[in-house]
Image (spheres, rainbow, N blue to C red):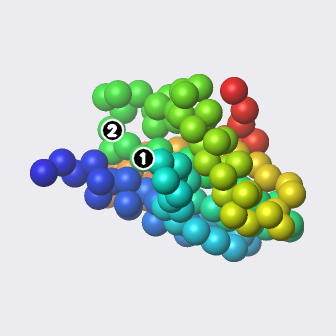
Amino acid sequence: MSATPDIGRTGENLAAEYYRSRGFAILHTNWRHSYFEIDLVASKDSLLHFVEVKTRRSGVFGFPEEAVDHRKLYRLMKAGVRYQHEYPRWRHVQYDVLSIRLHQGAPPEFFLIEDVYF
């Protein structure tokens, strides 16, 4: 069995803590509706953040954020629209990408790209 789901789950847990430590409320982790998915939904100051989390243990395949291409952003934005249909109170939204690199014996390295669009 691949360790990838464990790495993804670890990254999503670290992402939630990263956002909490910056004063965000975590509304959902792994929010799903039909074929839509959002790794993390957080809010702060009446702004809703839809977060795509990418986690890697090494640089063999590049930086984690490089795995977020225009197709992934498109799906994230479609998921965000679906989320807003279910929770219409949110008028102001932002799409973020949080890249996490895990290093053995060292703290994780975070790289946040805020307010992304393709």
Write the residue at 63% across / 62% down. 41
The residue carrying mark 1 is 55
Q: Is residue 62 above or below residue 12?
A: above
Q: Quadrant of the C terminus?
A: top right
Residue 87 visible somewhere in the drawing: yes
Please state which amino acid type lies under the numbered disc 2: Ser
Tell me if label 1 and label 2 are in contact, CB under 8 Å. Answer: no
Count residues near mark 1 (Cα–Cα under 10 Å), then give few for <14, some for 14-19, many for 20+. Answer: many
Q: Position of residue 17 (x, y in %)?
A: 55, 69
Count residues near mark 2 (Cα–Cα under 10 Å), then give few for <14, some for 14-19, many for 20+. Answer: few
CA distance for labels 1 and 2: 9 Å
Write the residue at 86% across / 55% down. 92
Please state which amino acid type lies under the numbered disc 1: Thr
Numbered mark located on residue 58 in the image: 2
Write the residue at 55% across / 28% down. 71
Element carrying mark 1: strand
Element carrying mark 2: loop
Q: Is residue 11 above or below residue 62?
A: below
Q: Position of residue 47 (x, y in %)?
A: 82, 60
Q: Quadrant of residue 7?
A: bottom left
Q: Position of residue 75 (x, y in %)?
A: 57, 38
Is residue 97 found left or right of 59 in the rendered image?
right
- Residue depth check, mark 1 versus mark 2: number of the one nearer the observer: 1
Is residue 38 found left or right of 86 in the rendered image?
left
